[in-house]
Structures are given as structure tokens and as C-alpha cells.
């Protein structure tokens, strides 16, 4: 496995109004790793993902994604943005599928219009992705006709269609029942097989214990604890981690 | 004692004779008295007073719109209607009408430089000739090989003639003569095109009063009172003595008539259908313009800088805050010194730009209704802002906007009737002309309503189907 990190965040700070949302975050994720960002709601987990995806400008620090570096201040210029977008995919908690397009076309839209892939090639790849995620039979359904789990898998396929080395997922476990959670975990582990890095936010410690390589605990905008997932969760040293576990 | 005598006199005089006329028609028919705007004056006013006197009553003027005189007299708003009311067969068929009291001629007015070019109707073949809607002149023009343009008043035909929007105006010689001083550079062709007569119109059942008024009018012809009144108002001419002789000789009304016979209901149907086609064309083209401009305004208000947003917001507020009628007037008449738009083009631009303001608000609302999360999802996939608008935001906004757009189109279809004020004859205008000429709104109104429904119902159906199809769409 290559040693170089796909994601490196250094001293990331973000203030909105008087509120300090992120107070100097340091974070790294290696190639092929599944990293879980944990913490109670309002701890800044989602904001970290949004900063990495360049949806949110930040006030201090730097984010390096596979050689592209985002710095504090306004969002980067277009050519740099394009480089970043190629490296980062994102699956939103509410999926945000394009409501006017079928599952299949949700997946093919970016390859055909951003990467200029031929329509037939894009559809073949989209079908393969939907197949591997177990939703190929729903390819002609519109988003509002999909169940929560189906929509999530289509959203994963949509992000995967651009083949980003880093995939961000916001609260993928939030609305799934235990059986589905297991399926999702196996899917995510499979996604890392080819060397892809996954950074997910969650407060589901069982899921993290079973599937994540590393866990990073966030509390009040700071990383309070991090390490191998099972170890961190087995021997919590910080009060916030213990609170998180008690909360479950 | 004098008070009692006065009261007795009032009782003896009976109720006043209410007569209806249109003071907007102006001199020399009926106009507001410059010394006392509460009073009216004019030759029709004096004839009305002679009639009242002959009936032993006092005349009381009731203001009514010219085109509504027949309907109002039938409804009983007043007993007699007069102010240039023409003797046409349809009127005689549906109302009680007196003997004629004045003979006029339809004359052509042209630009002075064209005086030798357009002398008769045949010289004007294929050219644009203006007149007042719902008049004998209008009916006559329809039988001629010219393009007929109708107006609601008798000032704008002459100003449009001067500006080159018309090549001639056909109207009563009295009207033509009184417009001459105010608009220089026009010429009245001396050869009359047709002859007509003014009458007093009464409710159909009121034949007893009609007969008494006939007696009064004939007596005033004999004793020279009418001649004195006409001379006073400068409308006595060489045609009148012979005309008086014919009336007093008991010539039947038919013998006094010139020009076309009674217009049949059926003869108006092709004109109504043609007008409906014009309504469709106006509605479709102005809607297309409204959609195009509305899209640009909505995009500018969402994506533009502060300056552009302020300008576009002002445009939308001004357009929505002022009447469409006013906008059409400004566009057609107000700007005519700077740019002389043809009527149809002015109508399309006026309706299109007006509806663009409303469309832009629909589109802006629809664009803002697309969840921000979807836009962010699209950005993380690498779409540019333009692509996000074109591929994700626009198509969904369009689906959201479809139902309100359909409503607007149906509203536009009906608002298109407003363009009749700038001489475009569309469905409603044609209907009102039709109604004025046959003297009833019942059949024309029903036909017109049916045509509007035929136009608007399929639209609603079509939009409903499109909406359903997009809901079930696979792409």
C-alpha cells in the first residue's frame, strides 16, 4: 500500500459569526482507508466534509487532497476547483438525487457532461455500478419512487461514477435499520478495495467498530481522540468519547 | 304665491325628458359647455331641447358611451338616445327609430399630398383605411377591398393618418370637418362616398312617443327651427333642403338610405373566426417573448450582480405596478414621435414585455424552490454553474413553473383583448363591433365566449397532460 496520505487537514479553523465551529482540526486519511469521523450532533463533523468538498470556505489552515491544496479564504478559482472535484466525491445525508432524472440518469449525468464520456459507455458503467450496489433493478425509477436505502445506493453510484480517490459520506448510517447497516458496511469496505479512501461521519459506534479502520472523535470543533477504530472505542480516554458511547 | 305658480308649472310640465348622448363625441354634436362643464351644448343638444319643448317637457341630459346608446335606451336608462345616432337597418329592426333629422355624408380624408392619389374607394384598394368602430362607415368599409382599421374615438384615426399609419379615414363629413383645424396637412375629398342620416332612437315598445317626436321634428323642419340650429353650428349645407323635402313628403326610411343592406349575423362569422386567429397569434407570440425575456430577467435576478439585480427588480415592479392599458398607450401613441411601431408589433411587444415581468417572478420562485442540496451535489460532481442551471436547476424549475405558466397563458389569451385600444382587431373587439352593428350582445357575446373557451380549454388540457408526462418521465 502506498504510504502517502490521500487527505491531510492541518489546523483547520472555521468561524461563522461569533461561533467557532472548527477550532484547529488536524486529520489524515491514507489510501484505501475507511475513516470514521465521530461526535455528537453539532460537533462540526458535517462542516469538515463540506470544507473538504470546497462547499464551504474556511478561515485558517489547509486541506490537501491528493496533491491539490485548499487554503483559507474564498473558494479557489475554477481550474483548481476542477482538479479538486476530480479527487473528491460526496454522498449527502439527504442524498439530494436530481429529482427530474431516473436513477440511471442521475448516475450518467456527470460522466457525460463533465468527463465527456460517450453516452453508451457511461450507461454501461452506471449499470455495472448500480448492479454492484444491488439497485440495478431500480434503474428506471425516479428518486421519489425509491426507498431511503435505494436512494442512498443510487447516490453512492452517482458519486462513484466519477471515480474519485476520496469519497465523503455524511451520516450514511442515520436512517438505516440494523440489517441494512450491515449491508452498507460491507459495501463500503468493498469500495476501499481498489485503494479508494472513505471518510464518513457517523455516531454509530457499532458500525465503526465493525467496518472502520480508524476513528476520529470530534467534540466542540476539536479532535479529542483518534486511532484504530476498535481500540479507541474499547478504551475511550476522553470524556467526549465516553459521552458518545453512553449516548448510543 | 309665485312659489305656488312655479310648483304648478313644474307639475304641468311633467317629469323631464331624459335623453342619452355621448359628450365625449364632442362638438358639434354634444360637448361639455366650456362656461359650465356641468351643462352640455351642441346641435344635438338643441334638437333634443326642441323635442322636449314639443312634448311639453324639459330636457335632461344623461351621459352614455356612444356604443352603448342602443342598449341603454332599451334598458330604460333614458327615453330617447341621440348624438349622431345613425339610421341603419339593424337599429330600425331592433328599436323604435324616428324620421331622420339630418343628412350627412361619409367622406374620405387623406394627407394633403395624396389628395390626387386617393380620391375614391377604388383608389385605396389594398390600403389601410381607418374609421370609428360600430358605425355605418365601418360596415361600409368591410364591403370594400381595403384594410379596415377601427378606432374607439375619432381623434386617433386622423393623427394616425397624419403619421402614416393609415392612408385614409372614412367618417361623417361633420366629424372630418371638425378635425381639420386641429391636424394640419390633411385634405377632405369633396366627392361623398356614401350618404347617411341621424335619427332619434327609442326603446322598441315606445312607438307612441316615437310618433309624437316625428311630429315635432317635421314641424321644426317646416318652421325653419332645425335650419336655424344647423346654421348656428355650421353644419347646414346644400344637401339639407332636398333632404327635408323628402322627409316631409313622407318618403319611407328605406328610400332615404344609401349603401349596404342589413348585415346578417352569418356575415360576421368569418370576421369573428379571423379575429380569433389573430387572438391566437398575438397570444402565442407574446407568450414566447414573455418566456424568453422572463427567463433572462429571472436568471439576472438570481445570478447577476447588485447593479443588474436592482435594474431588473425596478423593471418588474414598474411593469407590475402600472396598468397594461397604459403601457400599450405609451408604446403605441406615446412613443410614436420617436419610433412608429406598427399596431400589431406594438401589441406583441407590449403584451410580451408586460407578461415577462410576471413570468420572471414565476421562474425566480421556481428556481429558488429547487433544493440547494441538489445544487451542491451537482457542484461536487464537477458541474460548472452554467451546467448546474442548465442540467439540474432549470429543468426542475421549468416543471414547477409549468402550472402557473399555463394559468398566465390563459390570462394572456384574455388580456390580449386590451390591444384593441391600439387598433388591433382581435376577438373581443370584433365581437363588440358585431354587437354594435346588429344592436344586440346576445349572439355575438355567446359566440365570442364559445371561441375563447375553445381556445383556452385545450391549452389547460395540454398543459395538464405535459405535466403528467413529465411526472412519469424516464428522462
Image: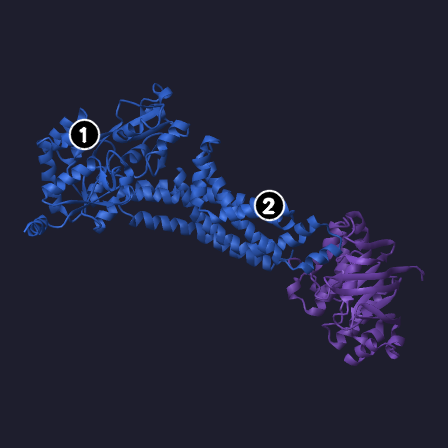
Chain colours: A purple, B blue
Report helix, strand or loop for mark 1: helix
Report helix, strand or loop for mark 2: helix
Q: Are marks 1 and 2 on the same chain?
A: yes
B406 relative to A220, above or below: above
Q: Residues within 10 Å of mark 2 (few under 14, many from 20)?
A: some
Q: Residue at x 85, y 53 (%)?
A: A68
Residue sitting nearer the eye, B242 or B304: B304
Q: CA distance from mark 1 to mark 2?
A: 62 Å
B201 relative to B336, above or below: below
Q: Is label 1 or label 2 in front?
A: 1
Query: For this view, does A173 lie left or right of residue B160?
Result: right
Asked if labels 2 and 1 touch by Cβ distance under 8 angstroms, the answer is no
The picture places residue B53, in percent across and down from the top left corner, at 11, 41
Q: Residue at x 24, y 31 (%)?
A: B259
The picture places residue A161, in percent across and down from the top left corner, at 78, 57
State which quarter of the image contains the C terminus of chain B. Answer: bottom right
- Disc 1 or 2, which lies upstream in sequence? 1
Q: Which mark is residue B232?
A: 1
Q: Residue at x 25, y 30 (%)?
A: B174
For the view shown, which residue lies furthest in the front direction?
Answer: B1
**What chain letter is assigned to the residue under label 1?**
B
Is residue B290 visible to us here? yes
**What chain letter is assigned to the residue under label 2?**
B
Report which residue position mark 2 lands on: B296
Q: Which mark is residue B464?
A: none
The picture places residue B469, in percent across and down from the top left corner, at 57, 57
Q: Residues within 10 Å of mark 1 (few under 14, many from 20)?
A: few
Residue sitting nearer the eye, B94 or A86: A86
Quarter where residue A163 is shown: bottom right
For the view shown, which residue lies furthest in the top direction?
Answer: B116
The picture places residue A40, in percent across and down from the top left corner, at 77, 73
Amino acid at each position: 500500500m502506498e504510504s502517502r496520505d490521500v487527505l491531510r487537514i492541518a489546523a483547520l479553523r472555521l468561524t461563522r459569526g461569533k461561533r467557532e465551529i472548527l477550532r484547529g482540526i488536524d486529520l489524515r486519511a491514507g489510501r484505501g482507508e475507511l475513516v470514521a469521523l465521530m461526535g455528537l450532533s453539532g460537533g462540526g463533523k458535517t462542516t469538515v466534509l463540506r470544507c473538504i468538498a470546497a462547499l464551504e470556505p474556511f478561515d485558517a489552515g489547509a486541506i490537501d487532497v491528493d496533491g491539490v491544496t485548499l487554503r483559507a479564504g474564498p473558494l479557489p478559482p475554477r481550474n483548481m476547483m476542477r482538479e479538486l472535484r476530480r479527487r473528491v466525491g460526496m454522498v449527502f445525508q439527504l442524498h439530494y438525487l436530481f429529482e427530474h432524472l431516473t436513477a440511471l440518469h442521475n448516475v450518467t449525468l456527470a460522466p457525460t457532461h463533465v468527463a465527456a464520456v460517450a453516452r453508451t459507455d457511461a450507461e454501461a458503467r452506471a449499470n455495472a455500478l448500480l448492479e454492484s450496489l444491488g439497485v440495478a433493478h431500480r434503474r428506471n425509477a425516479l428518486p421519489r419512487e425509491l426507498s431511503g436505502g435505494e436512494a442512498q445506493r443510487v447516490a453512492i453510484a452517482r458519486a462513484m461514477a466519477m471515480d474519485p480517490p476520496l469519497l465523503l459520506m455524511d451520516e450514511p448510517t442515520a436512517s438505516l435499520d440494523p440489517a441494512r447497516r450491515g449491508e452498507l458496511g460491507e459495501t463500503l469496505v468493498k469500495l476501499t478495495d481498489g485503494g479508494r479512501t472513505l471518510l464518513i461521519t457517523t455516531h454509530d459506534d457499532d458500525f465503526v467498530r465493525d467496518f472502520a479502520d480508524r476513528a476520529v472523535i470530534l467534540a466542540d470543533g476539536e479532535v479529542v481522540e483518534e486511532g484504530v477504530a476498535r481500540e479507541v472505542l474499547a478504551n475511550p480516554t476522553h470524556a467526549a468519547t465516553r459521552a458518545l458511547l453512553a449516548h448510543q | 304665491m309665485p312659489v305656488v305658480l312655479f310648483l304648478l308649472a313644474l307639475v304641468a310640465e311633467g317629469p323631464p325628458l331624459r335623453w342619452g348622448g355621448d359628450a365625449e363625441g364632442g362638438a358639434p354634436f354634444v360637448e361639455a359647455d366650456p362656461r359650465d362643464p356641468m351643462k352640455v351644448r351642441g346641435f344635438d343638444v338643441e334638437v333634443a331641447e326642441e323635442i322636449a319643448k314639443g312634448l311639453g317637457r324639459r330636457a335632461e341630459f344623461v351621459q352614455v358611451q356612444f356604443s352603448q346608446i342602443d342598449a341603454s335606451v332599451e334598458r330604460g336608462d333614458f327615453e330617447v338616445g341621440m348624438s349622431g345616432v345613425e339610421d341603419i337597418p339593424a337599429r330600425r329592426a331592433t328599436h323604435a327609430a324616428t324620421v331622420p333629422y339630418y343628412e350627412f355624408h361619409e367622406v374620405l380624408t387623406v394627407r394633403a399630398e395624396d389628395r390626387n392619389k386617393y380620391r375614391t374607394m377604388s383608389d385605396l384598394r389594398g390600403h389601410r383605411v381607418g374609421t370609428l368602430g360600430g358605425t355605418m362607415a365601418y360596415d361600409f368599409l368591410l364591403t370594400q377591398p381595403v384594410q379596415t382599421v377601427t378606432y374607439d374615438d375619432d381623434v386617433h384615426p386622423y393623427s394616425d393618418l397624419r403619421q402614416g399609419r393609415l392612408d385614409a379615414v372614412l367618417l361623417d363629413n361633420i366629424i372630418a370637418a371638425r378635425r381639420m383645424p386641429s391636424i394640419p396637412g390633411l385634405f377632405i375629398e369633396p366627392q361623398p362616398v356614401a350618404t347617411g342620416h341621424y335619427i332619434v332612437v327609442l326603446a322598441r315598445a315606445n312607438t307612441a312617443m316615437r310618433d309624437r317626436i316625428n311630429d315635432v321634428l317635421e314641424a321644426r323642419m317646416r318652421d325653419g327651427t332645425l335650419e336655424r340650429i344647423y346654421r348656428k353650428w355650421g353644419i347646414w349645407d346644400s344637401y339639407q333642403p332636398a333632404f327635408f323635402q323628402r322627409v316631409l313628403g313622407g318618403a319611407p326610411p328605406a328610400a332615404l338610405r344609401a349603401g349596404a343592406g342589413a348585415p346578417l349575423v352569418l356575415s360576421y362569422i368569418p370576421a369573428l373566426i379571423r379575429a380569433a386567429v389573430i387572438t391566437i397569434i398575438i397570444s402565442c407570440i407574446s407568450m414566447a417573448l414573455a418566456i424568453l425575456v422572463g427567463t433572462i430577467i429571472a436568471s439576472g435576478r438570481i445570478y447577476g450582480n447588485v447593479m443588474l439585480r436592482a435594474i431588473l427588480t425596478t423593471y418588474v415592479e414598474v411593469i407590475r405596478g402600472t396598468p397594461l392599458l397604459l403601457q400599450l398607450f405609451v408604446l403605441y401613441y406615446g412613443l410614436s414621435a420617436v419610433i412608429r411601431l406598427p399596431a400589431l408589433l406594438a401589441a406583441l411587444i407590449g403584451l410580451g414585455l408586460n407578461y415577462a415581468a410576471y413570468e420572471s417572478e414565476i421562474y425566480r420562485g421556481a428556481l429558488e424552490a429547487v433544493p440547494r442540496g441538489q445544487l451542491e451535489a451537482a457542484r461536487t460532481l464537477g458541474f460548472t454553474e452554467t451546467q448546474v442551471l442548465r442540467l439540474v436547476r432549470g429543468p426542475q424549475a421549468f416543471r414547477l413553473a409549468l402550472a402557473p405558466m399555463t394559468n398566465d397563458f390563459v390570462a394572456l389569451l384574455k388580456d390580449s383583448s386590451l390591444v384593441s385600444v391600439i387598433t388591433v382587431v382581435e376577438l373581443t373587439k370584433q365581437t363588440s363591433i358585431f354587437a354594435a352593428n346588429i344592436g344586440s350582445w346576445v349572439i355575438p357575446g355567446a359566440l365570442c365566449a364559445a371561441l375563447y373557451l375553445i381556445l383556452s380549454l385545450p391549452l389547460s388540457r395540454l398543459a395538464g397532460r405535459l405535466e403528467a408526462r413529465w411526472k412519469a418521465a424516464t428522462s
